[in-house]
Amino acid sequence: MNRDTHRRLVFFGSFVVAVILAIMPFPKWAEPFRPDWMGLVLIYWCLTVPERVSVGTGWLLGFIQDALYGSLLGSNALGKTLIAFLTVRLHLQLRMFPRWQQAVSVFGLLIANQLLVLWIRGAIGQAPDTFSYWTPSVVGALLWPWLFVLLRDFRRHGGLT
């Protein structure tokens, strides 16, 4: 297997794991605490290899998320596109931050995604009415330092230095 094929498998594998984690059943009490796995993995790859993972990948992941969740097609795609654009645009600054500051930045990116999706859902009359809508961003920011280290090791093991 050549090096480019191996790199593609590393990207593809991480996104497949994110999709599986996004649709995996959770207990009813833990469902509001499910982080945005696809958004977190997208942020990581946009930070580390912005020349390979960018806005198009964000749109595709969001479109897949729309199809999996049965939401309005394009709403999550627009949100993931926003995440990818902002992360690629700011990747040099974000990479210099310590992990805790990156976690705060990731929180801001995830909130921006949720605000955009909330605005779209509100426009079509499907806005959530509970505070638990915002918990995935908090949980995602809390998980970021460990997810970063895990994906970094996966990337290095996959030969993507």
Image (cartoon, rainbow, N blue to C red):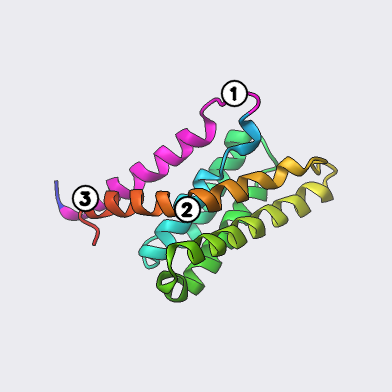
Residue 20 is one of the magenta-drawn residues: yes
Q: Which mark is residue 19?
A: none
From the top left corner, tell me how far across and down residue 69 is, in percent: 62, 35
From the top left corner, tell me how far across and down residue 9 is, in percent: 28, 45
Q: Amino acid at mark 1?
A: Pro
Q: Which mark is residue 144?
A: 2
Splitting the image into 4 quarters, where does residue 161 fall?
Answer: bottom left
Distance from Cα at disc 3 to Cα at disc 1: 33 Å
Residue on which the image places disc 1: 27
Residue in the picture at 22% in, 55% down: 4
Task: Mark 3 or mark 1: name the one nearer the start of the chain.
Answer: 1
Splitting the image into 4 quarters, where does residue 49 fall?
Answer: bottom left
From the top left corner, tell me how far across and down residue 87 is, in percent: 50, 66
Check disc 1: other Cα within 10 Å, few if <14, some if 14-19, many if 20+: few
Select label 3 or label 1 by which is in front.
1
Distance from Cα at disc 2 to Cα at disc 1: 22 Å
Q: Which mark is residue 157?
A: 3
Q: Amino acid at mark 2?
A: Trp
**Relative to 159, residue 30 above or below:** above
Query: Pointer 3 and pointer 2: residues touching (CB < 8 Å)?
Result: no
Residue in the picture at 61% in, 38% down: 33
Task: Mark 3 or mark 2: name the one nearer the start of the chain.
Answer: 2
Question: 82 and 95: which one is in front?
Answer: 95
Seen from this angle, which residue lies furthest left?
1
For residue 99, side relative to residue 139 (left or right): left
Residue range (magenta): 3-29
Check disc 2: other Cα within 10 Å, few if <14, some if 14-19, many if 20+: many
Residue in the picture at 68% in, 39% down: 71
Instruction: Please identify the dominant SS of the magenta region.
Output: helix
Helix, strand or loop at mark 3: helix
Question: 98 and 8: which one is in front?
Answer: 98
